[in-house]
Image (cartoon, rainbow, N blue to C red):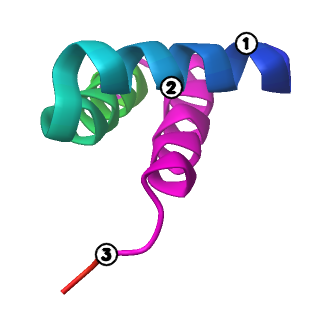
């Protein structure tokens, strides 16, 4: 999956699911890994990282 696709999916998930989007993507990564789908798990982790970057640093 290209970097552009990763960021598009990350953006869509954040818009649709808000704060829970990162947790949902992380859960998908775990499910893929448990199912032996290492490449899919890696892509979901990449999406998680993209969402974290889009969200920016935590504010207090």
Identity of the residue drawn at 46% across and 53% down? 52
Dot 2, how many residues are within 10 Å of its Cα: few (below 14), some (14-19), or many (20+)? Answer: many
Quadrant (top left/top right/bottom left/bottom right) for the C terminus = bottom left
Dot 1, how many residues are within 10 Å of its Cα: few (below 14), some (14-19), or many (20+)? Answer: few
Residue 24 visible in the current orientation: yes
In percent of width and height, residue 29 lies at 39, 30
Identity of the residue drawn at 58% across and 43% down? 50
Q: Please indicate whether residue 3 sits to the left or right of residue 35 in the image.
A: right
| Mark 2 or 3, closer to the camera | 3
Identity of the residue drawn at 31% across and 75% down? 58
Dot 3, how many residues are within 10 Å of its Cα: few (below 14), some (14-19), or many (20+)? Answer: few
Above or below: residue 10 compared with residue 35: below
Q: Which mark is residue 58?
A: 3
Q: CA distance from mark 3 to mark 1?
A: 25 Å
Q: Principal SS element in the magenta part?
A: helix
Look at the numbered disc 3 and give the secondary structure of its residue. loop
Look at the numbered disc 2 and give the secondary structure of its residue. helix
Circle 2 residue: 10
Q: Which mark is residue 5?
A: 1
Asked whether residue 32 is drawn in magenta, I would say no
N-term-proximal mark, 1 vs 2: 1
Identity of the residue drawn at 62% across and 15% down? 8
N-term-proximal mark, 3 vs 1: 1
Magenta span: 34-58
Asked whether residue 48 is drawn in magenta, I would say yes
């Amino acid at each position: 999956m290209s970097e552009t696709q990763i960021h598009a999916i990350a953006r869509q998930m954040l818009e649709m699911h808000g704060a829970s989007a990162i947790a949902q993507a992380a859960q998908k990564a775990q499910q893929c890994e448990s199912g032996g789908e290492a490449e899919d798990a890696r892509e979901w982790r990449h999406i998680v990282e993209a969402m974290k970057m889009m969200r920016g640093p935590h504010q207090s």
